[in-house]
Image (cartoon, helix red, strand yellow):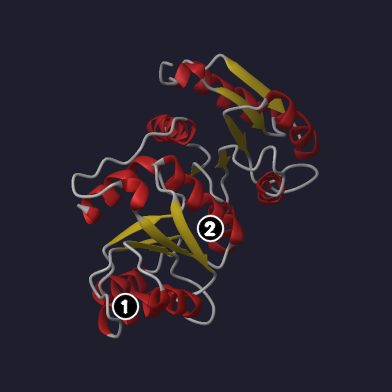
Amino acid sequence: MDKLQISDLSIILVEPSSTQRKLIVNELDDAGIMEIEAIENGTLALERIPLVHPNLVISSMYLPDMTGTELVTSMRNADIIKDTPFMLISSEKNFKRLDPIRQAGVVAILPKPFNRDDLLRALTSTLEFTHSEDLQLSNQDISELNVLVVDDSRMARRHIQRVLADMGIEKMTTAENGREAVELFEKESFQLIVTDLNMPEMDGNQLVDYIRTKSSKPDTPILMVTSENNNARLSNVEQAGVSAICDKPFEPLDVRETLTRILQ
């Protein structure tokens, strides 16, 4: 089967403003996408998504009946549509309001107005979510890789697990915080840790420091996936010895390239 192209994508656009709907639809048209259904509110979107199974849902933050956060959360809690890629287009800049969207696992968060190149990059990232391809490593079998996923957000854990599974990783254990991760790490052999930064009990920085300075396996590769935007905190993480840092939301291609680099 041929790999899906951007022009093959089917999209549901949830946007209450007729002006904004036209602008976004025009940009999608220019990108070559022909199958676009525009909807004005979240309730109708949640009815339509399970029926048409779009490749991508694009939504604004503030809808007449709910927020974009509530829309994506409802999607993630419904088995039939929980893995549908989601993109937010919003003028919202408040970190606390955007962070739950990032934790839910989204393709991209684009500003209003958005850059056309950013839109194309997000659409390309959608293709990565819809077309699985095993990670190729020269020194080990990817199916034998044992990975520990650490995040206090259930939706974030599930999103990361899905991305890793699409790369051929089959063995995954999850932990809700650094303290739980340490207990698992001391009992089992892991070849990779994927962790969040901001967590209760023990955060990602403390987890990295423990593994690097106190554990019996200090060389274990650690990928941090975080929405943190505080440069000082990120600098502390780098100094603690994290192998690599990826932003939330992340592009699967970036994660693939990063994992190839730190695991080879």
Quarter of the view holding residue 194: bottom left
Q: Which residue is mark 1?
A: 211
Find numbered disc 1 in the image and state the secondary structure of the residue it sits on: helix
The local crowd at label 1, few if under 14, some if 14 to 19, many if 20 or more residues have their Cα within 10 Å, is: many
Quarter of the view holding residue 168: top left
Q: Residue at x 56, y 38 (%)?
A: 85
Q: Which amino acid type is marked by label 2?
A: Arg
Q: Position of residue 127 (x, y in %)?
A: 45, 30
Image height check: is 58 above or below 182? Answer: above
> Camera-side residue: 79 or 243?
79
Residue 157: numbered disc? 2
N-term mark: 1 or 2: 2
The local crowd at label 2, few if under 14, some if 14 to 19, many if 20 or more residues have their Cα within 10 Å, is: many
Q: Residue at x 74, y 33 (%)?
A: 45
Image height check: is 223 above or below 68? Answer: below
Residue 31 in sight here: no
> Camera-side residue: 159 or 251?
159
* In the image: residue 68, left or right of residue 229: right
Q: Position of residue 119 (x, y in %)?
A: 45, 32
Residue 210 in sight here: yes
Quarter of the view holding residue 226: bottom left
Q: Position of residue 196 (x, y in %)?
A: 45, 65
Image height check: is 109 above or below 202? Answer: above
